Image (cartoon, rainbow, N blue to C red):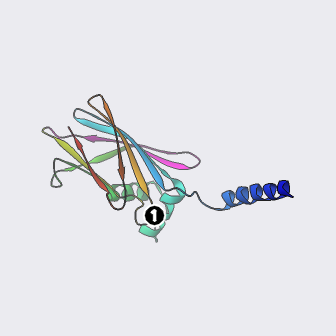
């Protein structure tokens, strides 16, 4: 009897996993600030990102242009303070079975003492969304996490 119940439990969890979406809402960014350049890549679960795109622009079809506009609306960078916006260029877009991946590069202005990063991607859709950032700068590796309660962080030079 116990063996049968165990088998039933395994089958229920297996079927539930194939029907339900993933339970964790997270994105990953790897970046490096090297002198006058900040570069890296960021990835998002496709189903989460597509849900956000459909809600953000319900009358548009989901294409690369919409994906980029959404990303640039919810990820912003500044040099020293919010009055000095930094332009993020997407150098490559790709995808795998589960994720959209955006590679980026950004020029860092002369005189930058700190970079402010505001990453609010998917916070409207998922209150538990975490946007993790792994950054290399001046030989150090630093980790940051953006959440709905704290979407902005500062990288000191």
> Which secondary structure type mostly characterizes the magenta part of the structure?
strand
Query: Residue at the bottom extreme?
Result: 59
18 or 58: which is nearer to us?
18
Q: In x, y percent, where is residue 150?
A: 31, 58
How many labels were placed on the picture?
1
Q: Quadrant of residue 30?
A: top left
Q: Quadrant of the C terminus?
A: top left
Q: Quadrant of residue 23?
A: bottom right
Is residue 110 at all visible to an observer of this figure?
A: yes
Q: Secondary structure at mark 1?
A: loop
Instruction: In the rendered view, tell whether residue 22 sits above or below residue 79.
Output: below
Q: Quadrant of residue 124?
A: bottom left
The answer to whether 153 appears left or right of 40 in the picture is: left
- Mark 1, Cα crowd under 10 Å, few <14 / some 14-19 / many 20+, is some
Q: What span is colored magenta in the figure? A: 92-110
Give the residue drawn at x 50%, y 64%: 51
Give the residue drawn at x 32%, y 57%: 151
């Amino acid at each position: 009897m116990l063996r049968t119940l165990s088998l039933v439990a395994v089958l229920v969890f297996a079927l539930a996993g194939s029907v339900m979406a993933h339970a964790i809402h997270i994105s990953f960014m790897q970046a490096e600030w090297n002198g006058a350049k900040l570069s890296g890549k960021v990835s998002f679960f496709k189903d989460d990102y597509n849900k956000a795109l459909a809600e953000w622009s319900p009358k548009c079809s989901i294409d690369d242009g919409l994906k980029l506009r959404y990303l640039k609306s919810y990820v912003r960078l500044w040099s020293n303070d919010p009055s000095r916006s930094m332009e993020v260029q997407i150098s490559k877009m790709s995808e795998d079975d589960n994720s959209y991946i955006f590679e980026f590069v950004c020029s860092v202005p002369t005189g930058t003492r700190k970079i402010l990063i505001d990453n609010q991607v998917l916070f409207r859709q998922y209150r538990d969304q975490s946007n993790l950032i792994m950054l290399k700068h001046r030989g150090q590796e630093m980790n940051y996490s953006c959440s709905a309660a704290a979407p902005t962080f500062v990288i000191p030079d």
